[in-house]
Image (spheres, rainbow, N blue to C red):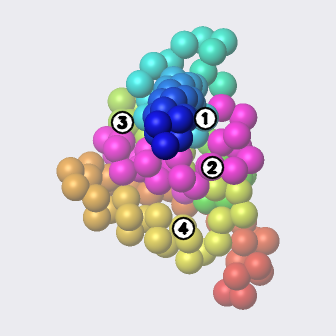
Amino acid sequence: MKAYSRFLKIFGVVVLSQLTVVFTINLLVDPYKIYRIINIEYFNQEKPLIEKQGMRKVKSIDIEQGNYEILLLGTSRVQNGLNPRSQVFGSKKAYNAGLPSAGIYELHQIIDFARTRKNSRLKTVILGLDFSLLIKNNC
């Protein structure tokens, strides 16, 4: 009986230590830009998974945490075509919330979410509408 309890203790310590290592690496690499604890060039600055899988999650966190006055919203054309740091916006802080394949309903939900969050400084929404967006959503 003692052999089993000793094995279970060692097994538990090994499993717990491995989970701690995996958690720590995930925290430092931060593949979806959620924790934002450290930002080291050539280590965890580039986030290729965000483009493929986690764009909506990251942008919703950014919208919730950010303090901006202008929200750029639309499909991937807005995401790739409008620069939030452009001189057109002057000294106002802008955030590009363009999403690939976004629909009208999703854009409406994003505007509501941005408007109703605590301490919202949102004053302007620049909405980029594509003809394909309107056809896709049967408007």
| Residue 92 - label | 3
Answer with mark 1 or mark 4, whichever residue precedes in sequence: 1
**Three-letter residue code for mark 1:** Pro
Q: Is residue 56 magenta?
A: yes
Answer with mark 3 or mark 1, whichever residue precedes in sequence: 1
Label 2 packing within 10 angstroms: few (<14), some (14-19), many (20+): some
**Three-letter residue code for mark 4:** Leu
Report the magenta residues as a range: 47-73
Labels 2, 1: front one: 1
Find residue 52 and report its horizontal and vertical position in percent: 74, 47
Label 4 packing within 10 angstroms: few (<14), some (14-19), many (20+): some
Label 3 packing within 10 angstroms: few (<14), some (14-19), many (20+): few
Q: Is residue 131 left or right of residue 47?
A: right
Question: Gap in Å between the C-alphas at discs 3 and 2?
Answer: 27 Å
Labels 4, 2: front one: 2
| Residue 31 - label | 1
Answer with mark 2 or mark 1, whichever residue precedes in sequence: 1
Label 1 packing within 10 angstroms: few (<14), some (14-19), many (20+): some
**Three-letter residue code for mark 3:** Lys
Labels 1, 4: front one: 1
Find residue 100 and report its horizontal and vertical position in percent: 70, 56
Image quadrant in which you'd find residue 68: top left
